[in-house]
Amino acid sequence: MATVKLWTDAEAEAHSKVKAVFDDIRATRKSDFVNNFWRGLANQPESLERVWNTLKAVMGAPGPLDPLTRELIYIAVSITNACPYCIHSHTAAARAKGMTDAQYSDFLAVVGMASQTNALVTGLQLPVDAAFLIES
Amino acid sequence: MATVKLWTDAEAEAHSKVKAVFDDIRATRKSDFVNNFWRGLANQPESLERVWNTLKAVMGAPGPLDPLTRELIYIAVSITNACPYCIHSHTAAARAKGMTDAQYSDFLAVVGMASQTNALVTGLQLPVDAAFLIES
Amino acid sequence: MATVKLWTDAEAEAHSKVKAVFDDIRATRKSDFVNNFWRGLANQPESLERVWNTLKAVMGAPGPLDPLTRELIYIAVSITNACPYCIHSHTAAARAKGMTDAQYSDFLAVVGMASQTNALVTGLQLPVDAAFLIES
Amino acid sequence: MATVKLWTDAEAEAHSKVKAVFDDIRATRKSDFVNNFWRGLANQPESLERVWNTLKAVMGAPGPLDPLTRELIYIAVSITNACPYCIHSHTAAARAKGMTDAQYSDFLAVVGMASQTNALVTGLQLPVDAAFLIES
Amino acid sequence: MATVKLWTDAEAEAHSKVKAVFDDIRATRKSDFVNNFWRGLANQPESLERVWNTLKAVMGAPGPLDPLTRELIYIAVSITNACPYCIHSHTAAARAKGMTDAQYSDFLAVVGMASQTNALVTGLQLPVDAAFLIES
Amino acid sequence: MATVKLWTDAEAEAHSKVKAVFDDIRATRKSDFVNNFWRGLANQPESLERVWNTLKAVMGAPGPLDPLTRELIYIAVSITNACPYCIHSHTAAARAKGMTDAQYSDFLAVVGMASQTNALVTGLQLPVDAAFLIES
């Protein structure tokens, strides 16, 4: 179904760079599960390593936004980009990080609202109010 | 510049439905400023009333997500939809609701990360892992 | 497959707000069929009620555009947003409202043409002709 | 501002293929005005000729959809693709073909509605109801 | 699964315009295989003929870009538009035209990089540097 | 105009991480020019460093795709994402790397073609031919 083969654990074990990333994914997440995204990216070991390291830094390191907020932003982008895999995997991740049904409903209402007003604004080609522009 | 005229305060005053919405915007926001989105939508009084009421309910009412988180979700959708007006107005709104520079940096890093992985996943056409699917 | 459970009729019967919306969908459409969109939205009863009421007002009320034209506009947006469910459901709705094969062919040719010229215009970054701008 | 030069009438006159297309645009539209889209495409005479001929066939020839309906579909795609030039030029074209303010309001409400429900459906990853699938 | 029936060879044989296009596809590609895109478009014989002729001219004729480069551009657009059929068919076509695994990895890294920086630039609403604008 | 200030050279000089990246941009490109993308990203020094290092690795390192092909892929994504800054900057970069007018015309014709067929395929919801799927 994918455009590339998905690497099995045995195949990953036999390639030092892929093995190192898979090991780090498992250690970081404290779980043996390695999802298809990494098994597909393994065909491109340089990208695999770079994307995993960036993901760890962006999504995993402590920072001003909490992990659930980051997941909600991630899902919002993924919905707008129409990426089913991304929506499923990050909605599952958000739930694992504590998202309640009520938060999910609130989230979807905001995404729907933004999508609607984006279309209206773009259709009307409205000029940006001076008040919204920063002085620089 | 817009595809419609932007209603002045005088024009809004003379139309009962538009006046009622503009009055409610000012009262709700405790500010005299009515931005161009509403001045453009005023050409369609039914939509103006409906969109304002929905926006108040979705973005303004207390709920499980706090106001700043809602704004970040809104901006994430607006960036992915490439809507300059929406990005400017909601980035300004996020700042007004307390977004710090550090939070904004964190936010943009997540949006960039999601956009990159969305493209990789879509390019590879990865099947969704069974672990991400809910039983229903 | 969905990120939420799809409500059965029995579950809907047991929730007063969801039941009221499902009843109104059936009465309005003069059909017992309630499609998955509403069964998924039922997890968020406030959104369910709001979206249904808006949909009834926007798509169902008599107005200057006839029902089939509205469906064609809906499908055009859904194709450009790459939403398979939306494309299937509204193409079926358009057929139910009388869309002929010849109209569908005409429609698709326009959508294809617009998509092509949108890309060319965006690639060339053409400035808008003064003649297209309204005086405001 | 564009990524290419926009051909003047004098430059078009001096190139036989471009001249032929510009002449046909003027004759077909019964107007001396040639908008920037064609002046930009003139840098690629093969594309200019092909796109113009296709546009004439798709948008100009009598068919099962009337000219205004075709323009509305065109604008719907252009809004969703976020193409300012396309939105301005085809909104102007729709007005020239008789679009009333009431029709435009109706149109925008449908585009906004579709954009909102597209996002909700995509977020929920709803399976297509069997009733919507054609037997083939 | 499609919104239209997919024409069998027998049905195509019985329609002169469709038959002519299918024959030309087979002759041009030196293969008996006619993929679903053409079997779906056959419902709209005018579009079928026009799209095939354009595709032959754009993708098939010798020109300044080689066939593989054209396929890579095609896939890049298809990924960004989130079109699974297009991604699968043109990735297969790229492989048939000689794309190596290393080229595919390189390609995907560029697509991912562009998607990320597109989002950052759009989020920041950066003004275009004067140095990038052509004088016209 | 941007949502953040664009860092001047003096401001960059005063921040060690930003200075290091700006210095490396200048050394790598053998040019004193630092474009607005980096001056905007400078507000987020971690992202600035990460994005620059990734860009250098993805776009700058020798690999199976030549520099011009990479730029064409980049522009194709940027057009489809409707990012004016990205289109201008990478079209300028492509020209600087030797793109001829004839190559640019060829490129745009492919982008237009892909955009059109993407829309047709998505509208028709065509199933992927078995022949396009890899065995895995």
Image (tube, coloured by chain):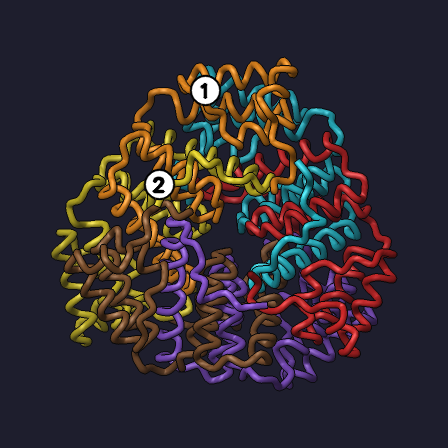
Chain colours: A orange, B yellow, C brown, D purple, E red, F cyan
Disc 1 vs disc 2: Cβ atoms closer than 8 Å?
no
Residue A85 as seen in the image, left or right of residue E101: left
Specify the subunit that label 1 lies on: A
From the image, tell me which residue sits under label 1: A32
Residue B126 visible to an observer of this rendering = yes
Q: Compared to E134, does B50 lie above or below?
A: below
Q: Compared to A91, does D11 lie above or below?
A: below
Q: Amino acid at mark 2?
A: Glu
Which residue appears at 39% of the width and 75% of the height? D104
Q: Regarding mark 1 in the picture, which secondary structure is present there?
A: loop
Q: Regarding mark 2 in the picture, which secondary structure is present there?
A: loop
Task: Please tell me in which quadrant of the rendered image residue F115 appears.
Answer: bottom right
Specify the subunit that label 2 lies on: A
CA gap, disc 1 and disc 2: 50 Å
Which residue appears at 23% of the width and 58% of the height? C10
> Which of the two residues, E11 or F1, is positioned nearer the viewer here?
E11
Which residue appears at 15% of the width and 68% of the height? B20
Residue C2 as seen in the image, left or right of residue F23: left
* Res. D130 mark: none
> How many C-alpha atoms fall within 10 Å of the one at disc 2: few (<14), some, or many (≥20)?
few
From the image, tell me which residue sits under label 2: A135
Residue C102 x/y as whole percent: 60, 80
Residue A25 x/y as whole percent: 48, 19
Residue E45 x/y as whole percent: 70, 75
> Which of the two residues, C102 or D28, is positioned nearer the viewer here?
C102
